[in-house]
Amino acid sequence: MPRHIAIIMDGNGRWAKLRGMPRVMGHRQGVLALKPIVKACAHLGVNVLTVYAFSTENWARPATEVNGLMDLLVEFLRSETQELKLEGVSIRTIGDIAPLAQRAQRALQEAAESTAEQSRMILNLAVNYGGRDELVRAVNRWLSTLGTKSREGPLAVTQEVIARHLDSAGMPDPDLLIRAGGEARVSNFMLWQIAYTELYVTDTLWPDFDPRTLAMAIRSFQSRSRRFGALES
Ligand code: FPP
């Protein structure tokens, strides 16, 4: 079983368009699709599920869509946190939440605080998340810890230092990255962490993604031979 599954929930807009609905209705249906996937992952023994809810590039969408996505996020947290807590799910965020509306920041903080003790699975919400932005923030975070202390020897960053300052510090890298909606690209998602992640792209649009689609992705993952750049042992 993958320890960490990451998902790009793409295709909401197309799902809505196919039905003559506004794009936000596709996102609303996308939230409905997410709930059974979170539960299925927790029941299957997945340790971390990371979902791409809002990217650093999504601000370029019309204000109605951006606001609609924020409303859905707050609604999701208000309505689901208690049930997820009972399922043993701890809710966390990756991404820079400082530019979000106060109510979204508060909802994310409250959900994280209220579920902090849960240890069955982490649900990581990627909000205002960009892989490049995360790397820049990680390096800056490290630089700010150095302060003005005197140092011996040249200053050098290492892979371990970067990993330790990422938003995802302490979590295993994703074993499996699932992308719904058929496009075969990474879209600035977890650039550092997916170095050796297995990719699975499905044409299924995210609102139609269900636990059977998840099972197919996991079966595909289980049939692969992961060598991490080495030879088969
Ligand atoms: C991509 O679909 C999806 C998004 C930009 C947002 C995903 C968000 C949700 C599923 C809902 C909010 C999340 C939570 C956790 C409450 P798209 O609009 O790019 O689809 P398209 O490619 O068909 O246009």
Image (cartoon, rainbow, N blue to C red):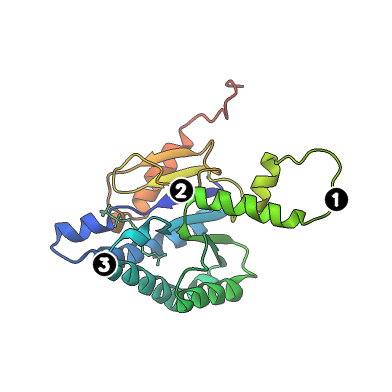
Q: Which mark is residue 189?
A: 2
Q: Is mark 3 within 8 Å of ligand 1?
A: no
Give the number of marks: 3
> Residue type at mark 2?
Phe
Quarter of the image where ligand 1 sits: bottom left
Please indicate, yes or no, whether residue 168 appears anywhere in the rendered image: no
Residue at 59% of width from left, 76% of height from top?
114
Residue 38 in sight = yes
In this rendering, would 109 be left or right of 189? right
* 70 or 11, nearer to the observer: 70
184 or 145, which lies in front?
145
Residue 24: mark in rendering:
3
Inter-mark Cα distance, 1 to 2: 36 Å
Quadrant housing residue 231: top right
- The x and y percentages for residue 206 are 31, 55
In the rendered view, does 91 fall on the left or right side of 147?
Answer: left
Could you give the CA–CA distance between mark 1 and mark 3, rounded to whole angstroms? 53 Å
Report the amino acid beneath label 1.
Ser
Q: Tag 3's secondary structure?
A: helix
Per the image, label 1 sits on a secondary structure element best described as loop
| Place of residue 65 in the rendered image (x, y in percent of width and height, measured from the top left) | 29, 67
**Which is more foreground, mark 1 or mark 3?**
1
Q: Is residue 150 above or below residue 223?
A: below
Residue 159 placement: quadrant: top right
Q: Residues within 10 Å of mark 3 (few under 14, many from 20)?
A: some
Residue 150's tag is 1
Q: Counting residues from the N terminus, which is met first, the one under dot 1 or under dot 3?
A: 3
Furthest residue toward left: 20
